[in-house]
Image: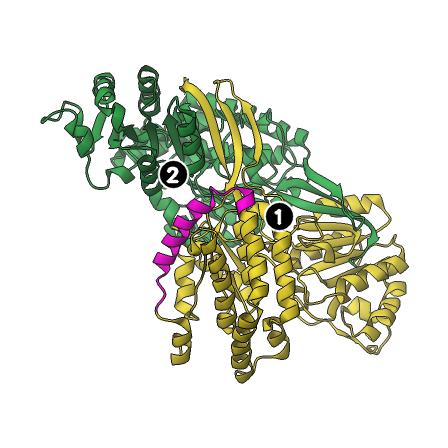
Chain colours: A green, B yellow
Amino acid sequence: MSAEQKAAAGGPVDLQAIGQRARAAACILAGLDSQRKNSLLLDISGAIVDALPQIIAANAEDLDAAQASGMSESLMDRLLLDEKRLQGIAADVRSIASLPDPVGTVMDGRELDSGLFLMRRRVPLGVVAAVYEARPNVTVDISALCLKTGNAVILRGGKETLHSNAALTRVIEICLERAGLPAEAVQHINSPDRALLTELLHLDAYVDMLIPRGGEGLQRLCREESRIPVITGGIGVCHIFVDKKVDADKALKVVENAKMQRPSACNAVETLLLHADIAAAFLPRLIARLVPLGATLHLDAAAAALLGPNCPQGTMPVQKGDYDKEWLSYDFNVRVVTDLEEAVAHIRTHGTAHSEAVLTEDLAVATRFVNEVDAAAVYVNASTRFTDGGQFGLGAEVAISTQKLHARGPMGPDTLTTWKWIAYGDYTIRE
Amino acid sequence: MSAEQKAAAGGPVDLQAIGQRARAAACILAGLDSQRKNSLLLDISGAIVDALPQIIAANAEDLDAAQASGMSESLMDRLLLDEKRLQGIAADVRSIASLPDPVGTVMDGRELDSGLFLMRRRVPLGVVAAVYEARPNVTVDISALCLKTGNAVILRGGKETLHSNAALTRVIEICLERAGLPAEAVQHINSPDRALLTELLHLDAYVDMLIPRGGEGLQRLCREESRIPVITGGIGVCHIFVDKKVDADKALKVVENAKMQRPSACNAVETLLLHADIAAAFLPRLIARLVPLGATLHLDAAAAALLGPNCPQGTMPVQKGDYDKEWLSYDFNVRVVTDLEEAVAHIRTHGTAHSEAVLTEDLAVATRFVNEVDAAAVYVNASTRFTDGGQFGLGAEVAISTQKLHARGPMGPDTLTTWKWIAYGDYTIRE
């Protein structure tokens, strides 16, 4: 019985063997031209649609187990794969097929004084590992992006999605095989064993990049335990600073968009910093507009003082720790600040370097905010909600990085590549 | 830690405080224009020359201690700072001042369908940490590159260089202060306490990138222990494949250059892979040329068989492990291979993805080698010795990365930066 068969049978998983097979597959994938990779992706897209009944049946097993374990409705919803969602996933794969292929492009090059002709050419990273929670769509998403860029991938999904992930990766394996490519290009760790995660994080001999997509605990574990270079991100404590020189009507519209459109997104705003000069006029309008929509405002003492002795409905005093919280809900903090300095200092203390915005008509304030706030994305007069690969025109998104190495902000297909320095000489030696 | 070492260290080191001060300094450095940074570098260059007697005196203390501890002569030589070397270090700082400043350049930008004008602007990483061995020149080198790119730096040099590093960083601190900048922009951990290294590796709250410059043990420790993103590299098990269609005279010249010019460099060649069709003619000429220069050839069985029953002078059989060894000496391995596939397979098994070369007149062989060998630098008809920031026209070199994330190969000043996505809107919201 092969290691894979053992894994499918629920037996022990041999991660060293998985790593070796991924590395071997990566060597083959790296040599594929764009047309062959895109044909494979189109085949996968079609095969997902063809396999709808099997995938939905596998997903039903996960859903049953989840229900039995008392999973919350919102998590159950993330887990659900129905026909509409699977059609959407298949469409995403087709759209990844239509993106330009970064692999093989020459980034720069020139003839050196030594006579060497030197260039940098984009090449796949090699082997990518993704660790994520109960989102079966990530299985297809990351696999498609890795295949697009010639990378092999090792997937470790949430234990709640084992059946769904196995069904989805089986579809991809079949497509790889009928394209004459190694099925091991996409391998799913088909076991919930927690010890395997630690072992995966130590697989630096075979894996070039690790992408954890999940909450703070997972990110921290990966940063602490991984010997593979990690891209952390996706946790957004985002701010909007409303300056004194502002069009209040338009500013209200932007704040509403940043908080209410999709509060579970990492680019939704957590804390509004109001310039003291406009806070008294702005805050009541904000409450009047957002509380009826379901918002809860957590007010600092200065903001609360502007509203009189009683907390209006939909407001409460800010608590210790609130400024560092990613709400992921219709809650947000409001703090009154005396000037730009205080706003920037607040963001430096509490921000996660994800997305930060200033709303102002004052060019000097805008420029200073842009220069002094250190985050993946900094906005002038725009909603923080734009921090997204699709919105930024990257076509698709691997993750959103909030670290500074390799990639920052929305990660497009380019970030699944590295480069090779290639030099042609005429038996050239270094003097 | 001995009493004397404690005295030299000047009391306990508070790494959390060092991290906080570095972060605060980084905010100020990020706002400096190029002219101010370059003036600072020119001042440092002059101040090193002015402080020659003090630096040499401090270095003498390190040398005395090293001699007393029985340090080898070659390590003593690496440790030595004399007038000529310090003049060279000062000149390097001036040349870093003259390089273009990557910070502030706009990498790309465009108007999006949403109406946002989006651009990526290069910004400093923030805080860089460097861990290195007994090379006091690295102290100035890394500090100058970090200041050039607006980064604060935390230095952890070898315990053998404490006095030298303290004297050099004191010179830099004085220059920072008289430029009205925080002296904490460059901080040297002035203690040999081993526990501080582990603590430094966990300082991810304040440090954005860690550069270990040293041997395999240090690299492995950093990869295993660090919570800060690490750039590993600088270990080169490099190969040259001599194809059957080759100009043997010219090939000999390239091999000589790659091995003999500076065998202690990471880009020197370790293993020569000889195509079987030319091995019998090539090998005796190689021996005749390189053995008189001091080379020792470690031959595989096929190569040895070509030379008859007795090992010629300067040759010996290859031993287990030799193919994975970075010789750093006039030793190298010679293996006979039947074709390009076998050469590529050998490189995949034993290479460290540093620098690999093919010598051939056959374009198809050259193209396949370039495509199939996965390394930071791949050469056609050139010596592996070119893998170097200066040779590649980058002006200066932070390190040579053999990993694939963030930077690969020689790391120029650009690699001490990241980017910020900056978007200007007109109170733009996401639909």
Would residue B323 be found to the left or right of residue B427 on screen?
right
Chain containing the residue with disc 1: A
Do the residues indicated by labels 2 and 1 lie within the same chain of the protein? yes
Alpha-carbon span between mark 2 and mark 1: 27 Å
Amino acid carrying mark 2 in the image: Glu
Residue B213 visible (yes or no):
no
Q: Which residue is mark 2?
A: A133
Vertical position of residue B22 compared to residue B290: above or below: above
Provide residue A332's location: percent of width, then percent of height.
26, 30
- Tally of numbered discs: 2
The answer to which of marks 2 and 1 sits earlier in the sequence is: 1
Q: Which residue is mark 1?
A: A24
Provide residue B132's location: percent of width, then percent of height.
53, 64
Vertical position of residue B279 compared to residue B2: above or below: above
Amino acid carrying mark 1 in the image: Ala
| Range of magenta residues | B12-36
